Image: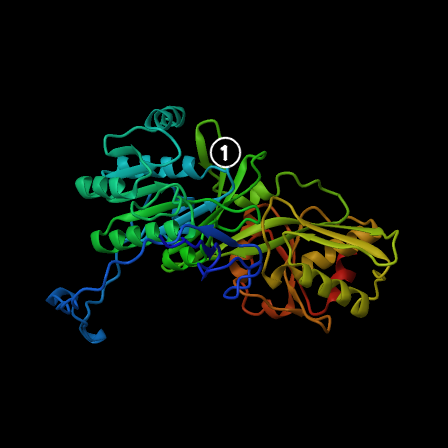
Amino acid sequence: MPKIKPLYVCAECGYESAKWMGRCPSCGAWNKMEEQAPPPPAAAAGPLRPRSVASPSHLAKPLSEIEDGEQARRRSGIEEFDRVLGGGIVPGSLVLIGGDPGIGKSTLLLQVSARLAAKGARVLYASGEESTRQIKMRARRLGVSGENLYVLSETNLDEIEAQREALSPDYLIVDSIQTVYVPGKTSTPGSVSQVREATGILMRAAKQSGTTVFLVGHVTKEGALAGPRVLEHMVDAVLYFEGDRHQDYRILRAAKNRFGSVNEIGVFRMEQSGMEQVENPSEFLLSGRIPGAAGSAVAVSMEGTRPVLVDLQALIAPTAFGTPRRQALGFDYNRMALLLAVLEKRAGFSLYNQDAYVNVAGGLELDEPACDLPLCAAVVSSLRGAPLPADWALIGEVGLAGEVRAVSLMDRRLAECARMGFTHLVVPKGNLRALRLPEGLEVRGVATLREALALLF
């Protein structure tokens, strides 16, 4: 009997090797090669199979002959969830939702299932981590019920597919993709081959039947989705549920969306009755702000089509070491280092012997240049110990020459500042042309960083 040799598969990209390697030669990931049982030997080669003939419905067509029409999105009834998906759920799509354990992925999807079932849609909730009795207990706590919501506790994908074909649901939720397995595969559930094969089967089922499939995915300790990287390429949308388990607020953001923008976010608050929508994220992000505190500035960031006001904090302290320490949470580190250099070279502030710590309150990730000017103002405020006025907000991109550049969507930013009760706003001078000012809001235009700091301090 021939000796069975093990097979090593990369958990990131699925590369297969006959021996273990510390670094995957395909994707370059370290310590991701996992041992798996080799596939069974193939049967002896028989006669060649006749070539199949494509049916008329599967023939290739010229692009000009394909019917033009956008599929109507289906609203789930949870506006923050629909916003992240691009305005609603696209029929026949495959959506992957990931997040840390206990963050609320299953709770949110159970609430979405109840809303959809209440509208007359048929939903099949297949869980590989909870029994039907446990799901019922959680549903009772959330106040979830519905005749069109079907619950299944199963990890065998063939059984889940049989139930899907029998019920013909409009929506299928699999919680989670790492717990289901495909019979006939020798590898364990959650392995690269199992996740890839199970996702492929569900993808074909979604496209052929029109059933929208939601997959719950586990994440690694680094925060990335567990399983092969090809998993994210196969699905239509990848959503991340972020937040601290010890806090009430959660942020749902899209990392990939074939049917909408990836810049939208949805804000939720964990309550005893489940996930509640936060319709005013600016109020939530500014709720803990202390007026009159040095090192705090209000920035206006665009998250997709929504303007959000955030508290941008900086702490500047003399360093006790030869090299000052720099740290940024929620703000790009390289961008912060660039702005500190501009402050030192163009504005004349000595920061070479100061530790600099930057934080975005509320757990939001800022990645747009319009937050440059607020960061510079927060750094100077902390350095001088001089707080900014509580009713002032700042918008503007700072260049290497110390100029303040214009930003986009200024009208929406101004309207959000006026709605939140701010009375003064510092903006780039280039944005003042043909700008409609909301009532009660005084806007000051600046051309350089020096001019802006002279106005503020």
Give the image location of residue 32, x and y in percent: 53, 54
Dividing the picture into quadrants, the one containing residue 64 is bottom left
Seen from the viewer's position, the closer of residues 196 and 255 is: 196
Count of marks, rendered view:
1
> Residue drawn 34% across and 53% down?
197
Give the image location of residue 315, x and y in percent: 77, 49
In the picture shown, does residue 113 fall above or below 455? Answer: above
Q: Is residue 88 visible?
A: no
* Residue at numbered disc 1: 270
Q: Quadrant of the C terminus?
A: bottom right
In the picture shown, does residue 430 fall above or below 114? Answer: below
Tag 1 secondary structure: strand
Mark 1 belongs to which amino acid?
Met
Seen from the viewer's position, the closer of residues 217 and 140 is: 217
Give the image location of residue 445, x and y in percent: 66, 65
Dividing the picture into quadrants, the one containing residue 351 is bottom right
In the picture shown, does residue 273 fall above or below 434? Answer: above
Horizontally, is 308 left or right of 186 in the view? right
Seen from the viewer's position, the closer of residues 165 and 315 is: 165
> Residue drawn 44% across and 39% down?
105
> Residue drawn 79% across and 70% down?
346
Seen from the viewer's position, the closer of residues 104 and 386 is: 104
Horizontally, is 256 left or right of 323 in the view? left
Q: Is residue 316 visible?
A: yes
